[in-house]
Amino acid sequence: MPVIDQVANDYLDDFDFLAIAWKSDLGAARERASELFSDNLRWGIDEDIFRLYGIPGQPASVIVTQGVIVDAWFGAAGDAELRSRLDAALALSS
């Protein structure tokens, strides 16, 4: 998640970044979020979102552009891969 937080800084005009906690309580999630995220990411707890997007566990990422899922993957992505996926999503929306 620190990679997403860092990369998000360069894409704030193009995307909203949201991190969803799973199988946690609000206090524990808040403490961990304060360690991992800057103001680049919004976060919350919503276990239903994993079911809705067909995500079997964490880490997982979904890119939604104009209400359509344009990319999704299970597992961590490094800086270069994340930027490549975000750039591809931007190209689709322009």
Image (spheres, rainbow, N blue to C red):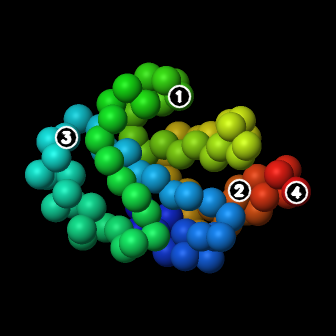
Q: Earlier in the sequence, mark 3 or mark 2?
A: 3
Which one is closest to the eye, mark 4 or mark 3?
A: 4
Amino acid on which disc 1 is placed = Tyr
Q: Earlier in the sequence, mark 4 or mark 3?
A: 3
Distance from the alpha carbon under mark 3 to that under mark 2: 28 Å
Q: Earlier in the sequence, mark 2 or mark 4?
A: 2
Question: Is residue 81 in view?
Answer: no
Q: Earlier in the sequence, mark 1 or mark 3?
A: 3
Q: Is 66 in front, or is 38?
A: 66
Residue drawn at the location 71% of the way across and 46% of the way down: 65
Residue drawn at the location 43% of the way across and 31% of the way down: 49
Q: Secondary structure at mark 4?
A: loop
In the rendered image, the residue lying farthest to the left is 27
Q: Earlier in the sequence, mark 2 or mark 1?
A: 1
Q: Secondary structure at mark 1?
A: loop
User: Is 65 rendered above or below residue 53?
Assistant: below
> In the drawing, what numbered circle is on residue 53?
1
Q: Which residue is mark 2?
A: 85
Quarter of the view holding residue 21: top left
> In the drawing, what numbered circle is on residue 94?
4
Q: Which residue is mark 3?
A: 24
How packed is label 3: few (under 14 Cα within 10 Å), some, or many (20 or more)?
A: few
Residue drawn at the location 53% of the way across and 40% of the way down: 74
Distance from the alpha carbon under mark 2 to that under mark 1: 18 Å
Q: Earlier in the sequence, mark 1 or mark 4?
A: 1
Q: Secondary structure at mark 3?
A: loop
Amino acid on which disc 2 is placed = Arg
